[in-house]
Image: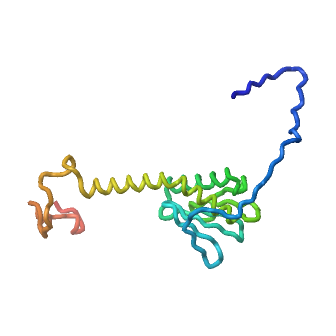
Amino acid sequence: MPVNITIDDQETTPIPQEPEGIKIEIVEKDNIEGKLNVRSAINGDLMIMDHKDIDIVIKPKDKKIVAFAKETLSDLVYGAESRLFEYLRKVGVLELDSIQGGNIYGSLEGQIQEGEKSVEITLMKISEWMVTEQPMIAGRTAYDEMEDEHLLDPDGEYSTELGEVPQAAKKGSIDKSTLFAPYLYGRYSY
């Protein structure tokens, strides 16, 4: 329902206080569910390698999350890192003003908020984010496979009448061994 606001020069009425009858009850949930392929480093860092474009490292000692490019840095990598940190910021895992570029080229990092089970909750929220990323990853993988199939086994419109051309040591009518390249002899001599 839209709210209309009118500003008058008259005296404004004070904002009503919160009613006393409202109580908020926090129910603790002991079991945290999610599915991730997590590896532990020698120093205790948790490494998540499930995403197609980025690797995520949780540093429990520093209370920090760092995302790195998996292979090459591209717009897809920055987009994935940005979506991850924006999601973690919105769900309250990261401190709002801590998201910044890391000390490794193309990485992003953020500070995890202090809490009793902050690492476990962070893992759960990253698992939830990975579920939202799966349709995008599946679509890109299917498109890559379709493109490979199109290049390796083209249909009739994109192929020649010759069909399969067998291997041969010498093909075509131009002999490459008899070509004269004057620039190979120092000065142009034509």
The x, y position of residue 172, in whole percent, is 11, 61
Question: Which residue occupies 29% across, 56% down?
Answer: 149
* Image quarter (top left, top right, bottom left or bottom right) of the N terminus: top right
Question: Which residue occupies 58% across, 55% down?
Answer: 129
The x, y position of residue 118, in whole percent, is 71, 63
Q: Is residue 11 left or right of residue 153?
A: right
**Front in this rendered view, residue 51 or 72:** 51
**Front in this rendered view, residue 72 or 151:** 151
* Image quarter (top left, top right, bottom left or bottom right) of the C terminus: bottom left
Q: Is residue 140 above or below residue 116?
A: above
Q: Residue furthest bottom?
A: 42
Q: How many marks?
A: 0
The x, y position of residue 162, in whole percent, is 12, 55
Quadrant in the rendering for residue 182: bottom left
Q: Is residue 85 left or right of residue 13?
A: left
Question: Which residue occupies 19% across, 49% down?
Answer: 156
Q: Residue furthest top?
A: 9
**Front in this rendered view, residue 7 or 185:** 7
Q: Is residue 70 left or right of residue 86?
A: left
Q: Is residue 158 above or below residue 164?
A: above
Quadrant in the rendering for residue 126: bottom right
Q: Residue furthest left?
A: 173
Question: Which residue occupies 69% across, 66% down?
Answer: 119
